[in-house]
């Protein structure tokens, strides 16, 4: 697959780690101890790293989990992995509770994709106070709140504004100035959702295309389906829907089909999940962005392992790649 664009990369592939085999438990409990009688009990203790994700119903996160598990399995001596996620994109309380459970379970590091950029900061402060290394992946925590709390948390993730701008620019090529489009936003208190909205807006503004409606469907397919249906109803001349993730793009596609407007309204998304790839191949969807979910947690884990080894290591934020995906490069 040819990559149309690739933003800045990472260079921390050569991390030295500690040790051992791992396990996972999708709902936040750890049974990840050494294997009795297998010889593992003679090994030095491995650090426990907890990956805390968002909705496991979203393929983006199951891909992320698979990438992390593969990474751990390739060098099982190095660390123990505990994989967690929530069921509902908006269940911030559950995600915070998982962080507390991981602190109680005695993990050495938490690598988290926060469901909200602000609400998760207090529980992560607790984690840091308990001596747990915290690494932020995917959705950046709010800089101002981190600063106010005096917290330094490295971020590993893509430039979402730029990624969305590239997707929007690609869409703009098949529209003309004055055309009307609508935006489906992610959860409004998530930094990456806001950045994607801004990227879409910039692309549309640059091309003289009018955004006639912009609403949050909270990253979810069902909500986006309902909202897209009402957008199509309210704007009979709508030419495209720009969705901040593929789950919402799929909801929009279904609404467009139900309104019998598949020939008139284009859809773009973000994530490159398999259903979006299929829709792009079939010509039902125009484009998405691949933010390499399978690698995102891996890079976060590598940063965490480095910090476990050297708590004073100075680690800057790391920008990860994001690539435009179209029918052309899916061939
Ligand atoms: C974001 C991710 C994905 C995902 C969304 C839904 O943080 O970057 O785009 O679809 O969360 O939870």
Image (cartoon, helix red, strand yellow):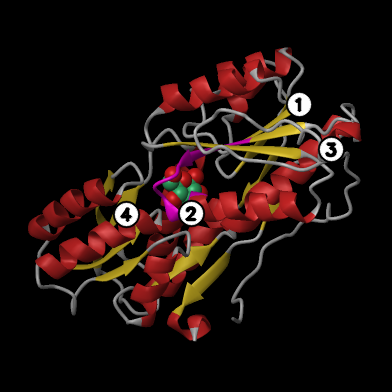
Q: Earlier in the sequence, mark 4 or mark 1?
A: 1
- Observer-side mark, 4 or 3, equals 3
User: Image quarter for residue 28?
Assistant: top right
Q: Is residue 280 above or below residue 312?
A: below
Q: Nearer the viewer, mark 2 or mark 4?
A: 2
Circle 4 Cα neighbour tier, 10 Å, few/some/many (<14 / 14–19 / ≥20): many
Report the disc number at residue 248: 4
Question: What residue is rendered at 72% in x and 35% in y?
Answer: 154
Would residue 59 be counted in the magenta stretch?
A: yes
Q: Secondary structure at mark 2?
A: helix
Kindly report which numbered mark, 4 or 1, lies closer to the viewer in this rendering. 1
On the rendered image, what quadrant is the N terminus found in?
Answer: bottom right
Mark 2 vs 4, N-terminal side: 2
Label 1: few (<14), some or many (≥20) within 10 Å?
A: many
Q: At 31% across and 68% down in the image, what residue appears?
A: 267
- The response on whether ligand 1 sits within 8 Å of label 3 is no
Residues at marks 4 and 1, CA–CA distance in whole angstroms: 35 Å
Residue under pointer 2:
60
Query: Bounds of the magenta span?
Result: 51-61
The residue under the point 48% across, 54% down is 60
Q: From the viewer's perspective, is 25 left or right of 16?
A: left
Closer to viewer: mark 3 or mark 1: 3
Q: Is residue 183 visible?
A: yes
Height in image: 304 above or below 151?
below
The numbered dot on residue 108 is 1
Residue sitting nearer the eye, 230 or 234: 230
Front residue of 256/108: it is 108
| Residue at numbered disc 3 | 40
Of pointers 4 and 3, the one earlier in the residue sequence: 3
Give the tally of numbered discs. 4
Would you say 121 lies left or right of 247 here? right
């Amino acid at each position: 697959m040819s990559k149309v664009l690739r933003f800045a990369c990472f260079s921390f592939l050569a991390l030295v780690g500690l040790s051992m085999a791992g396990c996972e438990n999708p709902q936040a409990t750890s049974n990840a101890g050494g294997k009795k009688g297998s010889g593992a009990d003679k090994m030095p203790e491995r650090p426990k790293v907890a990956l805390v994700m968002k909705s496991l119903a979203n393929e983006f996160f199951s891909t992320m989990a698979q990438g992390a598990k593969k990474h751990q399995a390739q060098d099982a001596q190095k660390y123990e992995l505990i994989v967690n996620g929530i069921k509902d994109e908006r269940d911030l309380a559950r995600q915070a509770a998982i962080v507390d459970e991981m602190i109680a379970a005695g993990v050495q590091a938490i690598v988290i994709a926060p469901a909200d950029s602000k609400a998760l900061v207090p529980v992560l402060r607790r984690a840091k106070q308990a001596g747990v290394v915290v690494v932020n992946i995917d959705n950046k925590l709010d800089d101002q709140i981190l600063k106010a709390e005096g917290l330094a948390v490295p971020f590993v993730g893509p430039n979402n504004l730029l990624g969305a701008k590239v997707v929007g620019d690609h869409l703009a090529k098949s529209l003309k100035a004055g055309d009307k489009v609508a935006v489906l936003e992610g959860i409004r208190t998530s930094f990456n959702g806001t950045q994607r909205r801004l990227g879409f807006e910039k692309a549309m503004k640059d091309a003289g295309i009018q955004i006639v409606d912009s609403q949050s469907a909270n990253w979810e397919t069902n909500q986006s389906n309902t909202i897209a249906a009402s957008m199509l109803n309210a704007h009979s001349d709508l030419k495209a829907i720009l969705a901040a993730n593929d789950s919402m793009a799929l909801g929009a596609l279904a609404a467009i089909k139900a309104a019998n407007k598949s020939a008139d309204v284009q859809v773009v998304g973000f994530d490159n999940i398999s259903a979006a790839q299929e829709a792009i191949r079939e010509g039902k969807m125009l484009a998405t962005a691949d933010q390499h979910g399978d690698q995102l947690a891996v890079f976060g884990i590598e940063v965490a392992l480095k910090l476990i080894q050297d708590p004073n290591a100075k680690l800057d934020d790391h920008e990860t790649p994001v690539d435009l995906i179209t029918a052309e490069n899916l061939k």
